[in-house]
Every structure is written in C-alpha cells, then in structure tokens.
Image (cartoon, grey):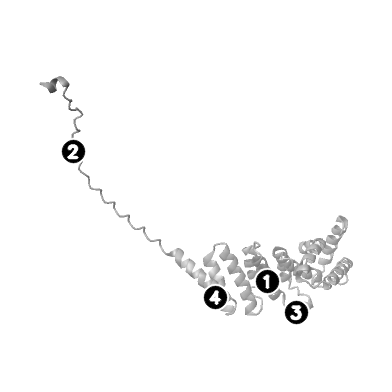
C-alpha cells in the first residue's frame, strides 16, 4: 500500500503529466511508474479465474490509483491515459458506477480511446458496462441510483453502438424506476427497450405495469348502501295472572265436628 507521501507524489505526477495536451504520456516518468504498478496488478488478476474474486481484488486495488485519477481529472488536458481508462473499467467491474462516470465524462470530453484489448469505442463500452453493473446490483437487491443511469444515457446519446446494447440500458433503467414507484417513466423506458430489441425480455414487465397503471387510474366504486334494519314488531305485554290465594282451608276442630 502506498504511503501518504507516495500518494501525494502520484497526484503531483499525474497533474504534471496531464499538462501534455493531446499527447501520449509514455515519456512522463511519473506515468511510467504508475504503469509499472498497473502491469503488476494486471498480472495478479490474470492468475485469478473467478470473475467475482477478480472484482473483489480490483476493489482493493483501486484506492492505490485514486491520487493519479484525481490529479488527471483536476488538471488534465486530454492526453491519452491508459491508467485512467483501465481504472474506469475496474470501477465498473467493482460496481462503482458513480466513480466510473467521473472518469467517463473526462474521457468522452477529450475523446480518449479504450484500451485496445476491449475493442469497443468508449461510448459503446460505457453504455453496456454501466447497464451490466446496474443489473448486477439490482439482481442482488442492492440500491441503484437511477440518476446515474440517466446520466449514462445522456453521455452516450450520440455514441454509435448496437441497438441491443442501448436496449439493456433502457431495460435496467425501467426496472429501477418501477421499483421506485415511477410507473409511467418506467413504462416509457421498458417500451423503448422493446423497440430496440424485441428479445429484451421486458414484455411481461410492460403488461404488468400497464395493468397496474390502468387499475390506479380507475375511480374506486362507491360502497354499496347498507340495507336498512327492519324494525322489530313490538310484542304485547301479557296481563299478569292473579296469584293463587295463599289462604289455607282451616280444618274443622273437634268441637265443630261434634255439632
């Protein structure tokens, strides 16, 4: 791990190298040192087969390049920078979409190219890999900031790419919006994904959303009036029967009986 002094020197070297407007950085000594570190890290990653494990390793490596990235973004004038572009790729592999977009804005502004082994223009790469990273987070139940997806769309609006790639970005944007309760906006993006790629896998999602929107727009039926309770007929009170006389018949006394 780089010491604070080494990190400071890396940032200063990046700022100095970044002043080389529209030129390669291969003759900048600070840049060469960072490239050597990057080459060593890439050799380490090459020996790992698990994609998930590679992402974890990259997540641990990325802080070492933060001073270089900060220096270039602060003072850069558009020189092609392999370190910067690899860091952008690694950030997406590590699900750091926000960090990748910070670099992407700079890269697209100055027309920086992707590393040759990726074989895709920068806008094409960005749209596809942001969609992949967002889908990975969404599938795992992790939060995805829809603002980052919309920013990616805006950044890559004029970029040339296969329709299927752009459909991926619209699909995940629609799914995230749906989960946030923004049904109308979600439906718009899912339908756009369907237009771009009929096999995008959004047909059922569109149908469910349309039913939900329709149900929400229909007024609730008025509750049926409660039936009036029938008055109970009054029962006539019975007349009280006179109680039997409690007087007992006196038995005749012996004197009376002799009369």
- Between disc 4 and disc 2, the foreground one is 2
Q: Does residue 121 lie above or below 92 as drawn?
A: below
Badge 3 or badge 4: first in the primary sequence: 3
The alpha-carbon separation of the residues under discs 3 and 1 comes to 17 Å
Tell me: 4 left or right of 200.
right
Q: Residue at x 49, y 70 (%)?
A: 210
User: Which quadrant would the N terminus be assigned to in this image?
Assistant: bottom right
How many residues crowd mark 1 within 10 Å: few (<14), some (14–19), many (20+)? some
Badge 4 or badge 2: first in the primary sequence: 4
x and y percentages locating residue 31 in the rendered image: 86, 67
Q: Does residue 47 lie above or below 13 as drawn?
A: below
Tell me: 177 left or right of 75.
left
The alpha-carbon separation of the residues under discs 2 and 1 comes to 91 Å
- Between disc 2 and disc 1, the foreground one is 2
Are the residues at dot 4 and dot 2 in contact (C-beta closer than 8 Å)? no
**Residue annotated with mark 3:** 119
- Between disc 3 and disc 1, the foreground one is 1
Are the residues at dot 3 and dot 2 in contact (C-beta closer than 8 Å)? no
Considering the numbered disc 3 on the image, is that residue within a helix, a strand or a loop?
A: loop
Badge 4 or badge 1: first in the primary sequence: 1
x and y percentages locating residue 186 in the rendered image: 55, 68
- Between disc 3 and disc 4, the foreground one is 4
**Residue annotated with mark 2:** 239
**Residue annotated with mark 4:** 203
Considering the numbered disc 4 on the image, is that residue within a helix, a strand or a loop?
A: helix
User: Image quarter for residue 67?
Assistant: bottom right
């Amino acid at each position: 791990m780089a010491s604070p002094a080494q990190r400071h020197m890396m940032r200063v070297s990046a700022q100095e190298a970044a002043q080389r407007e529209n030129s390669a950085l291969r003759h900048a000594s600070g840049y060469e040192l960072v490239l050597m570190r990057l080459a060593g890290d890439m050799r380490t990653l090459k020996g790992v087969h698990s994609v998930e494990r590679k992402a974890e390793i990259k997540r641990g490596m990325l802080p070492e390049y933060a001073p270089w990235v900060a220096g270039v973004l602060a003072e850069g004038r558009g020189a092609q920078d392999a370190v910067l572009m690899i860091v952008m790729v690694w950030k997406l592999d590590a699900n750091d979409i926000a960090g990748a977009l910070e670099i992407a804005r700079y890269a697209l502004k100055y027309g920086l190219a992707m590393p040759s082994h990726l074989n895709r223009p920068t806008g094409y790469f960005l749209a596809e890999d942001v969609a992949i990273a967002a889908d990975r987070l969404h599938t795992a139940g992790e939060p995805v900031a829809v603002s980052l997806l919309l920013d990616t769309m805006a950044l890559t609006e004029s970029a040339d790419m296969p329709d299927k790639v752009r459909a991926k970005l619209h699909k995940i944007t629609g799914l995230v919006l749906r989960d946030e309760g923004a049904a109308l906006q979600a439906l718009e993006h899912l339908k756009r994904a369907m237009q771009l790629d009929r096999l995008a896998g959004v047909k059922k999602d569109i149908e469910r959303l349309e039913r939900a929107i329709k149900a929400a727009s229909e007024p609730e039926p008025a509750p049926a009036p409660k039936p009036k309770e029938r008055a109970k007929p009054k029962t006539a009170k019975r007349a009280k029967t006179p109680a039997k006389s409690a007087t007992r018949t006196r038995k005749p006394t012996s004197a009376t009986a002799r009369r």
